Amino acid sequence: MRHIAIVGSGPAGYYTAEAAQKMWSDDVRVDVFDALPVPFGLIRTGVAPDHQSIKGVSRRYEKVATSDNVRFVGNVTIGSDVTIAELQELYDAVVLATGAPNDRTLAIAGADLDNVFGSAEFVGWYNGHPKFAALDPDLSCKTAVVVGAGNVALDVARILAKTEEEFAGSDIVGHALDALRDSAIERIVILSRRGPHDIQMTPKELGELGSLQDAMPIVEQGDLPPVETDETLDPGSRKSVQLLRDYSQNAPDEVSPKRVRIEFDFFASPAGFSGDGKVSGVTVERTRVEEGRAVGTGETYDIPAGLVVSCIGYRTSPIPGVPFDERAGRFANEEGRILPVLYCVGWARRGPSGTIGTNRPDGYAIIERIAADIEGGSGKMGREGFDALAEQRELDIVTFRDWQRIEEAEIAAARVGAPREKFVDVASMIAAGGAAQD
Ligand code: NAP
């Protein structure tokens, strides 16, 4: 028998659990830990609430989670409730699948002003992550600046631009829907420090901006490189750039019947935020691209803006006792190996890149490596040992059955047409999970 602990119940965690099942069938016991009382990590609190089809992948994780040899151990923080060293003692392999839940920050003047947020905070707010549910962004301004040219910047811009009707069928949390309903934002500026050929936005997601009910994307024709240079791009990027070309047909100065303008500002890097307590403006430095890198030109201009969301990537949370690569913002590892018995997978291994599906081969690869390292298992105590420790520490563990009760309560509380209304604080989740004992 092998005993595997997986820390984190998002895509990387459950694909790893699935791979362990496939590798060892009945000869493995897998415990999937999560600091929250609810599973699925990024699927619940990262993927945009209006992307329900992407969230549907959690049904696959559910199949893994409800099988006999895998269990969910929610509401347990590894690193404080239980140490990594303790897990290493108890399990044959400990796999950190903790993702990258913290914002990379912009080290520029004014970054600590009110209403300047990182995307982990802002996305966590509209997705009801307990840590960020009380963020309460002020949307009473006319202009918002979104920093970054990746899919998260697109998510944030789209959520800010949608009408209430367009959230039908989404699971955006009630507090965010209320705030967005009253939003005064009519201009969203996306700052991209490089050019149209360098965006990280994928065509499907970028294309969504073109069919919004009451918002229009605008690209300045002068920012686009000659059309023949698109041939150097891979097919996906070429499609994205074609969309930018389409959006450049939306004349920037024309009075649009649509309420919100989403303006792409290329070769533009934030140099500082100004304001008295709260942000009221962004100083932007014009850039040029040299050998693929954005270089400041010294030319600056100001954008009056009352909300800033910086979407420039994420970092993994360090865990005491686990070697950390500060520069890369993830665990120090060699192909997922950190220390004896200790591994990492997904964003915690490679940084915040790729799609949800990228985590599947990652999970299968780490189990291959673990299989080579541990062979037949070492007679460790596994979950029995953990249960004894949890009892001694009086940990309030949330099981998958408890989560199913939480989910039932969320479904019952849903707005008409919505899949659920999420609990946004840990106490309510735990209360709902324990509401009716089996
Ligand atoms: P990302 O794709 O890496 O994009 C980050 C953006 O921030 C880049 O445009 C980058 O520019 C810019 N940036 C970084 N540091 C900056 C700085 N100091 N100043 C100005 N700009 C800066 O990251 P992401 O958008 O956070 O997405 C993370 C991952 O999740 C990606 O793999 C993404 O595709 C995925 N995702 C997918 C979906 C979906 O499929 N629907 C939705 C959301 C996220 P440079 O390129 O110049 O560095």
Image (spheres, grey):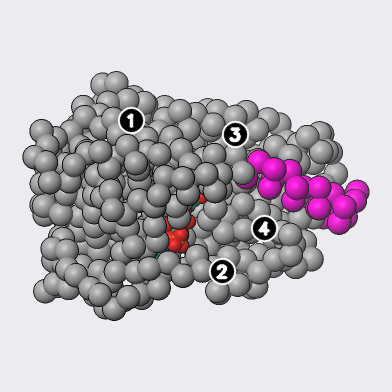
Q: Label 1, on which residue?
A: 170
Foreground residue among 263 and 340: 263
* Mark 2 vs mark 1, CA separation in Å: 34 Å
Q: Label 4, on which residue?
A: 344
Q: Label 2, on which residue?
A: 328
Q: Quadrant of ligand 1?
A: bottom left
Where does residue 408 sit, x and y in percent of width and height? 41, 27
Disc 4 residue type? Cys
Where does residue 389 sit, x and y in percent of width and height? 65, 57
Task: Please state the total of marks drawn on the protein image.
Answer: 4
Please report the bounds of the magenta region as a residue range: 359-380
Disc 3 residue type? Tyr
Residue 109 found in image quarter? bottom left
Q: Is residue 34 visible?
A: no
* Mark 3 vs mark 4, CA separation in Å: 19 Å
Q: Label 3, on which residue?
A: 61
Does mark 4 have its CB less than 8 Å from ligand 1?
no
Q: Which mark is residue 32?
A: none
Q: Nearer the viewer, mark 4 or mark 2?
A: 2
Kindly identify the residue that appears in the image at 32 percent across and 75 percent down.
Answer: 297
Disc 1 residue type? Ser
Q: Quadrant of the N terminus?
A: top right
Element under disc 2? loop
Evaluate if marks 3 and 2 touch, with contact meaning CB atoms under 8 Å apart.
no
Kindly identify the residue that appears in the image at 79 percent across and 66 percent down.
Answer: 340
- The answer to whether residue 106 is magenta is no
Kindly identify the residue that appears in the image at 57 percent across and 55 percent down.
Answer: 347
